[in-house]
Image (spheres, coloured by chain):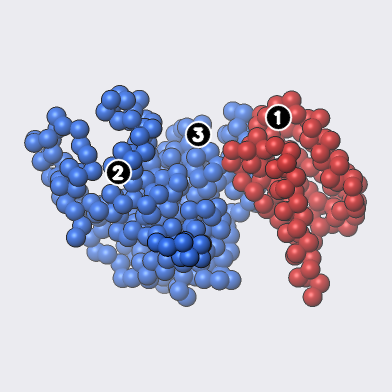
Amino acid sequence: MNRATLLSRESFVELGARARAQALLDPGTFRELAGPFDGLTSPWLARQGVVPQGDDGVIVAKGRIDGQPAVVMAIEGAFQGGSLGEVGGAKISGALELAAEDNRNGIPTRAVILFETGGVRLQEANLGLASIAEIHAGIVDLRRYQPVIGVIAGQVGCFGGMSIAAALCSALVVTREARLGLNGPAVIEQEAGIAEYDSRDRPFIWGLTGGEQRFAIGLADRFVEDDTAQVRDVVAALATAPVDATPRSEQYEHYLQCITEYVARDASHQPDPAMVRRYLGERE
Amino acid sequence: MEQLQFEYAAGEPASRRVLVGVVGSGDLEVIIEPGAKGKTSIDVTTSVNGYGRVWDAQLTRVFSAEPRAAMNIRIHDFGATPGVVGMRLAEAFEALAEADGKEST
């Protein structure tokens, strides 16, 4: 990419969650639900000495995408690492449930989730976990009717229970900055040891869990530049496409087979990006 | 974490609600809603303890320097420096002024 295109494009990664949601919806259609003035802050954070945020770090907005009814849920990665607590989680699962209800009433509402999250908010423990389980159920329900599109732009990435939510989406869009993993690098290092997994080795971390690798091995469906116009166009095309009859999460037999083969042949070797591509199959 | 309250004399109620900022490291969010005529009240929740006098000095300077509309303001601060606080408040006032400009036309 030359300097002129780099300067002329608008970064998506640098946008806050609300601006991202606005960028994806048709101009003038953005209408925020359960917003920052509605007093829905976390009831748990202040009791533990943590400053809350007016929207609990989750923006839910109704609007239209290419003229079709849509709801966009955006997680603010700058607030508490994009962690999901009781309120923020309920905002997402509630929006998904209402979108599915719309579809049962003949309104073809589709959904876009902007993941920027380390997963459950530890200060809210089981309430956060419960709400993430409800988000999973909400995605599986809604994706029968209309696409549920996940976007991981970066730089927080998408981890923990919310990585499962991302995997349940009808389609997943990633950038080079994105990371997707069940556990974050620091957690794996703590459990497996620094010799096996050095969380400060950025090329290693991105090589295994980064957007480019996740796209190459088929765990993500679109690889986009950090360009707001491109993200918008790709999301709009996916969100208005026909519903996929066999989402990736239904193909678990295939992935279990890949893991079985790896365990049988190579489990004693440290996996590197090329080895993962060999076992999971590289996209042409 | 510390919670602080401030009150200042003000004019007519602000014309609309405004949100700026994010509760991210070294940053803050400012939530502004129209207040009762004649009074601006500010609730500050800050992650840094012991800076009540600094908040008092800065907010008094900002809200006593010139007459402002009456507002209910909530500030959620995550370790912002006074410089960042000043910029976020200026950003919020600018958003309020822009809205006023649009509504008068």
Q: Amino acid at mark 3?
A: Glu
The residue under the point 33% across, 30% down is A198
Q: The chain coloured blue carries which letter?
A: A
Judged from the image, the secondary structure of the residue bearing numbered disc 1 is: strand
| x and y percentages locating residue B16 in the rendered image | 75, 60
Distance from disc 1 to disc 3, alpha carbons, whole Å, reads 20 Å
User: Circle 2 — which element?
Assistant: helix
Label 3 SS? helix
Question: Which dot marks residue B47?
Answer: none
| Chain B: drawing colour | red
- Residue receiving disc 3: A124
Q: Nearer the viewer, mark 1 or mark 3?
A: 1
**Chain ID at mark 3:** A
| Badge 3 density bin: few <14, some 14–19, many ≥20, Cα 10 Å | some
For the N terminus of chain A, the image quarter is bottom left
Tag 2 subunit: A
Disc 2 vs disc 1: which is toward the camera?
A: 2
Please state if A141 lies on the left or on the right of A123 as rendered: left
**From what the image shows, is residue A208 above or below residue B47?**
below
Mark sitting on residue A207: 2
Q: Which residue is mark 1?
A: B2
A9 lies left or right of B36 = left
Image vertical order of residue A217 relative to residue A129, above or below: below
Identify the amino acid type marked 2.
Gly
Separation of residues labelled 2 and 3 (CA atoms): 32 Å
Q: Amino acid at mark 1?
A: Glu
Residue A71 in sight here: no
